[in-house]
Image: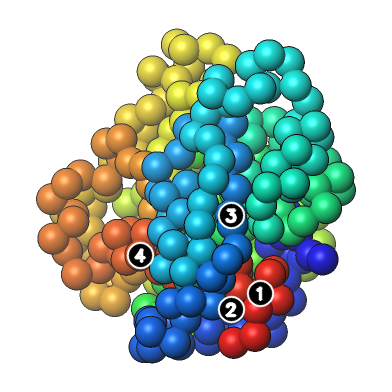
Amino acid sequence: MRSLIDIQELTTSEIEELIAVSEDIIAHPEKFSQKCAGKKLATLFFEPSTRTRLSFEAAMYELGGNVIGFSEGASSSSAKGESVVDTVKTVSCYADIIAMRHHKEGAPLVASLKAGIPLINAGDGGHNHPTQTLADLFTIKKEKGGFENLVIGLCGDLKFGRTVHSLISALSRYENIKFVLISPEELAIPDYIKEEILKKKNIEYTEVSEMQDVMPELDILYMTRVQKERFFNEADYIRLRDSYILNNEKLLNAKKDLSILHPLPRVNEIAVEVDADPRACYFKQVLNGKYIRMALILKLLEVEV
């Protein structure tokens, strides 16, 4: 039995395998429509979600399985004080696999050790979000053909953005990657990411505060929202939330084949006018996320494909 808590738990060959299965699902959906018949996915979301939760549910339904679970902690016995471990041990009596989101870093890891069935980390606080990273990687592979020789701009909340942390971790294993880290000083990438990943692996990176200065060199621009729920001080949130807004004017000097990604939800960091730009890939990411989660569910349930 295997769970997925951190993207580093998957080898690069396993990521390629998941992408290949995802492409097969897109090409031959009928072949996979009953692969999980009789199986149940439990979605345990202690923190709000739209895309991730519905993506997991759609993935399981399209594999012929069923879904149980809850969409907020208040509707579970955790509101009565039940521990996360007791919750997952209970749910494992009813389901075959769990997708879990929690506001506390490390909660899905602790839960996975006691679950007794495969558990997928669907986001834990500001730490990790491996299935969003799989969706990001699948999108990059489809748009760029691979993961090497890319200049990747990461913009916005790099301090609390778990999707950014997971993506840096995943892409650090590929050749000739350069990161351009675009953020206000207060939302800069954490030191542990710089020390344990970027510097340790001798990966080139630059830190800048202005998007315009670096736009012409980027192959990928990964936008993030400034997350109100990660701030202790509302005044700081209000001051920083509009720090970086991407619009058509800022794209004038960008590469013609730039790929614009965003894990969503967006607030106002990407103007709606950008949606019509062929370089906008964020809604493609949403769809790609469903397919890659289908592939992951099949892998963790050890379903023959």
Spatial CA span between label 3 and label 1: 14 Å
Please say whether residue 257 is visible from this viewpoint: yes
Query: Of label 4 and label 2, which has the lower sequence position?
Result: 2
For mark 3, what is the residue? 41
**In front of the other: label 2 or label 3?**
3
Amino acid type of the residue that numbered disc 2 sits on in the rendered structure:
Leu
Q: Residues within 10 Å of mark 1 (few under 14, many from 20)?
A: some
Q: Are marks 2 and 3 in contact (CB under 8 Å)?
A: no
Residue at 86 percent across and 45 percent down: it is 114
Q: In the rendered view of the protein, which quadrant contains the N terminus?
A: bottom right
Of the pair 143 and 17, the residue shown nearer to us: 17
Amino acid type of the residue that numbered disc 1 sits on in the rendered structure:
Lys
Spatial CA span between label 2 and label 3: 19 Å
For mark 2, what is the residue? 18
Query: Of label 2 and label 1, which has the lower sequence position?
Result: 2
For mark 1, what is the residue? 299
Task: Say how many tags the image has.
Answer: 4
Spatial CA span between label 2 and label 1: 8 Å
Query: Of label 3 and label 4, which has the lower sequence position?
Result: 3
Q: Are marks 2 and 1 in contact (CB under 8 Å)?
A: yes
Residue at 45 percent across and 20 percent down: it is 237
Amino acid type of the residue that numbered disc 3 sits on in the rendered structure:
Leu
Of the pair 23 and 285, the residue shown nearer to us: 23
Residue 58: image quadrant is: bottom left
**In front of the other: label 3 or label 1?**
3
For mark 4, what is the residue? 287
**In front of the other: label 3 or label 4?**
3
Residue 225 pos. (x, y %): 41, 38
Of the pair 112 and 33, the residue shown nearer to us: 33
Residue at 55 percent across and 40 percent down: it is 69
- Vertically, is 238 above or below 171? above
